[in-house]
Image: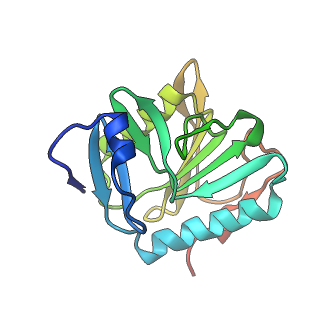
Amino acid sequence: MATLPKVITYEEWLEMPVVEDRLEEVVEGEVRFMPPNKVPHARIIRALTAAFLRQLDFRKTECLSSTFGLVIRTEPLVCRSPDIAIFELATMVEKDGYLHSAPQLIVEVLSPSESRKEIRAKLDDYESLGVPEVWLVSPEACTVELLQLEDGKLSRTALVAEGILQPKHFPGVKVDIAEIWPA
């Protein structure tokens, strides 16, 4: 990931030009540009998003994937871009074109280039925002690690390689793990 040479404030970041089709996150005020997802990663995101879209009530929920900013905090600035986030509309807070509230579910598809430290930093950010549930999808292991917020900490509740996933806050949604892997 490339970074800009200085730490920026939220206000400075808002003034930066938006470059379409460029993935970025801001961590502790440092803008980090990320390479585009590889095709298998994108296919998993597409399969999961399609499963959610078929089953969610969009009068009450919003499912976003990879192309939005989730502001964790403005000082120092941290803005993540989760692979998938599902929000209850009643809890969404949008400001300056970015979301400033916890989704009820985040799905991260792990990349081989991500270190455990980078993944832990994301999870720490999601904890601080109060995200109640995170799924870590491992294309290499063909597993999904389920984490739930308990006493302010995201803790593993299961590591599964098969079966049906059912988000805690969206009990009507069922995702067959076998259907998310690229053919």
Nearer the observer, 178 or 82: 82
Number of numbered discs overlaid on the protein picture: 0
Q: Residue furthest front?
A: 15
Nearer the observer, 48 or 162: 48
Above or below 85: residue 155: above
Identify the residue at horizontal 43%, vertical 56% (top origin): 110
Q: How is the image coloured?
A: rainbow
Q: Position of residue 9 (x, y in %)?
A: 31, 34
Above or below 108: residue 92: above
Nearer the observer, 68 or 11: 11
Nearer the observer, 129 or 39: 129
Identify the residue at horizontal 78%, vertical 44% (top origin): 170
Q: Is residue 115 left or right of residue 41?
A: left
Q: Position of residue 33 (x, y in %)?
A: 29, 57
Q: Residue furthest bottom?
A: 183
Q: Is residue 71 left or right of residue 47?
A: left
The C terminus - image quarter = bottom right
Above or below 18: residue 60: above
Q: Residue furthest left?
A: 5
Q: Is residue 146 left or right of residue 126?
A: right
The N terminus - image quarter = bottom left
Q: Position of residue 60 (x, y in %)?
A: 82, 45
Q: Position of residue 77 (x, y in %)?
A: 36, 34
| Picture quadrant where residue 134 is located | top right
Identify the residue at horizontal 58%, vertical 46% (top origin): 106
